[in-house]
């Protein structure tokens, strides 16, 4: 199939935008990256996602697809003969992948994000405790889904790897701010090894923001009161 | 080996009903098990340790949780009959998008309608109607969100349709004048065989709604 007209509206710092970028890389689909300016929304974004007005938005032959995990599935469905499958073939394994991806967005990430907004020490401690509880769930999920292979999706990165892995840079920024290892090798050895493999994958490296750059950006959008 | 399908559920649940509808659309034999949500069974806690919620589909001993995830699973396993999701990738993405919209934009206001009163309830009603209007705009002049056929988004919405009457009576408002074409589609869905067999009558749901409202001291 000829290279189709694929554009992605997004921003370098957004973990949600990273998801379709990794998926497109895995499928070797060339695309034009339309970077939004932080603090304002382009006409194209507002027109393409009138319901939520959020990034990422994939434009495929000018037809918009919104919501990051939905875009990843769309990429997998559309370029199904290109590159490895992003979702497992067995319906039960697919249901597990979707379940955990939704958990990550609705519970785990909500907690992670709340750390950078957290006020006092007590609040921060509570957030870390919740994150660590979530990590324990994810460690077990990894063991169940990966079945001994390096990724949730098996031999290759897939939907669930992308759903969680996109947050690793923000996780590192949070660890720096907390002076505390949240993804701890001692507590979650499999997940920690997975994180390392994920970050080193050639489809991920070009789109994973550098921790230092992201930390600077975080200071701008989550201003801390002076100590 | 015959499939063993168990559904852990709660009779008035707008989420549980989605799973029941999907199973009946596919003609799947299943064992329905009523959960007492104030005294959850060890099986439920074991099968859904993350959320401890219904519905949980247990297929040959393996659990699937989260209602629309259950519906998708049912569609993929029993793929020979009555497809729930469209086959075209773009249409599938659109169906998933709107189900995500239903579950993120209707959920909270719908809950607040029967959990609150006064100002808070008025705000909830407004948000609920606003979200329904966006959905109505997406429906357009199609009989169903799925087009000519009852599909993924319709199943998601039927959970909420089943509570429309109770919500209207509890909060003293009417959805039909605000969203006439959505209501027409709702009526169509509520008459479907798989839905009729899966739903308890609206009087029962209303009585239940009044009961829980008392528990919330409203």
Image (cartoon, coloured by chain):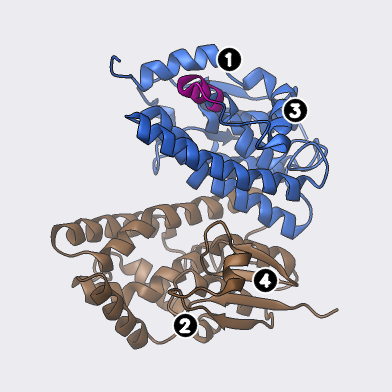
Q: Decide if residue A88 is on the left or right side of residue B139.
A: right
Q: Chain of mark 2?
A: B
Q: Please rate how many residues cluster around mark 2, counting C-alpha atoms within 10 Å: few if below 14, some from 14 to 19, many from 20.
A: many
Q: Which residue is mark 3?
A: A197
Q: Is residue B72 above or below residue A30?
A: below
On whether residue B187 falls in the magenta region, the answer is no
Which mark is nearer the camera, 2 or 4? 4
Q: How far is mark 2 from mark 1, CA to CA? A: 53 Å
- Do callouts 3 and 2 mark residues in contact (Cβ within 8 Å)? no
Find residue B99 and report its horizontal and vertical position in percent.
50, 56
Q: Please rate how many residues cluster around mark 1, counting C-alpha atoms within 10 Å: few if below 14, some from 14 to 19, many from 20.
A: some
Residue A66 visible in the snapshot:
no
In the drawing, what numbered circle is on residue B199? 2
Residues A90 and B60: in front is B60
Q: How far is mark 3 from mark 1, CA to CA? A: 16 Å
Q: Which residue is mark 1?
A: A210
Label 3: element kind: helix
What colour denotes chain A?
A: blue
Q: How far is mark 1 from mark 4, CA to CA? A: 43 Å
Find residue A184 and report its horizontal and vertical position in percent.
63, 31
Sequence-wise, which precedes: disc 3 or disc 1? 3
In the drawing, what numbered circle is on residue B58? 4
Q: Most extreme residue toward the right, as rendered?
A: B1
Q: Decide if residue B79 is on the left or right side of residue B138.
A: right
Highlighted magenta segment, given as a residue range: A171-180
Q: Is residue B213 above or below residue A92?
A: below
Q: Which chain is brown?
A: B
- Do callouts 4 and 3 mark residues in contact (Cβ within 8 Å)? no
Sequence-wise, which precedes: disc 2 or disc 4? 4
Q: How far is mark 2 from mark 4, CA to CA? A: 21 Å
Q: Please rate how many residues cluster around mark 3, counting C-alpha atoms within 10 Å: few if below 14, some from 14 to 19, many from 20.
A: some
């Amino acid at each position: 199939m000829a290279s189709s007209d694929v554009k992605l509206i997004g921003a370098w710092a957004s973990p949600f935008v990273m998801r379709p970028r990794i998926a497109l890389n895995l499928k070797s689909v060339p695309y034009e990256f339309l970077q939004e300016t932080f603090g304002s929304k382009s006409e194209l974004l507002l027109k393409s996602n009138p319901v939520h007005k959020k990034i990422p938005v994939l434009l495929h032959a000018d037809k918009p697809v919104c919501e990051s995990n939905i875009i990843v599935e769309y990429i997998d469905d559309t370029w199904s003969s290109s590159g490895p499958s992003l979702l497992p073939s067995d319906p039960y394994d697919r249901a597990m992948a979707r379940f955990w991806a939704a958990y990550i967005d609705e519970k785990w990430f909500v907690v992670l994000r709340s750390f950078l907004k957290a006020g006092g020490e007590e609040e921060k401690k509570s957030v870390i405790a919740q994150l660590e509880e979530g990590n324990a769930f994810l460690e077990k999920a990894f063991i169940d889904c990966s079945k001994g292979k390096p990724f949730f999706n098996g031999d290759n990165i897939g939907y669930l790897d992308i759903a969680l892995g996109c947050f690793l840079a923000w996780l590192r920024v949070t660890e720096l701010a907390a002076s505390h290892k949240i993804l701890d090798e001692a507590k979650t050895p499999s997940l920690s090894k997975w994180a390392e493999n994920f970050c080193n994958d050639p489809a991920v490296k070009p789109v994973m923001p550098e921790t230092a750059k992201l930390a600077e950006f975080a200071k701008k959008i989550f201003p801390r009161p002076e100590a | 080996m015959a499939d063993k399908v168990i559904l852990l559920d709660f009779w008035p649940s707008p989420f549980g009903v989605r799973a029941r509808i999907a199973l009946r659309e596919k003609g799947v034999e299943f064992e329905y098990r009523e959960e007492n949500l104030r005294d959850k069974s060890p099986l439920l806690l074991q099968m859904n340790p993350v959320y401890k919620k219904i519905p949980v589909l247990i297929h040959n001993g393996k659990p699937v949780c989260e209602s629309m995830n259950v519906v998708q699973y049912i569609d993929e396993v029993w793929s020979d009959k009555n497809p729930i999701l469209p086959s075209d990738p773009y249409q599938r993405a659109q169906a998933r998008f709107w189900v995500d919209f239903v579950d993120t934009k209707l959920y909270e206001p719908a809950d607040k309608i029967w959990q609150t009163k006064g100002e808070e309830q008025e705000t909830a009603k407004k948000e609920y109607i606003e979200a329904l209007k966006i959905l109505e705009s997406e429906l357009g002049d199609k009989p169903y969100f799925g087009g000519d056929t009852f599909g993924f988004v319709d199943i998601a919405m039927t959970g909420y349709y089943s509570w429309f009457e109770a919500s209207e009576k509890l909060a003293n408002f009417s959805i039909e004048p605000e969203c006439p074409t959505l209501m027409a589609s709702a009526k169509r869905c509520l008459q479907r065989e798989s839905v009729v067999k899966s739903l308890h009558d609206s009087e029962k749901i209303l009585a239940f709604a009044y009961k829980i409202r008392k528990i919330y001291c409203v």
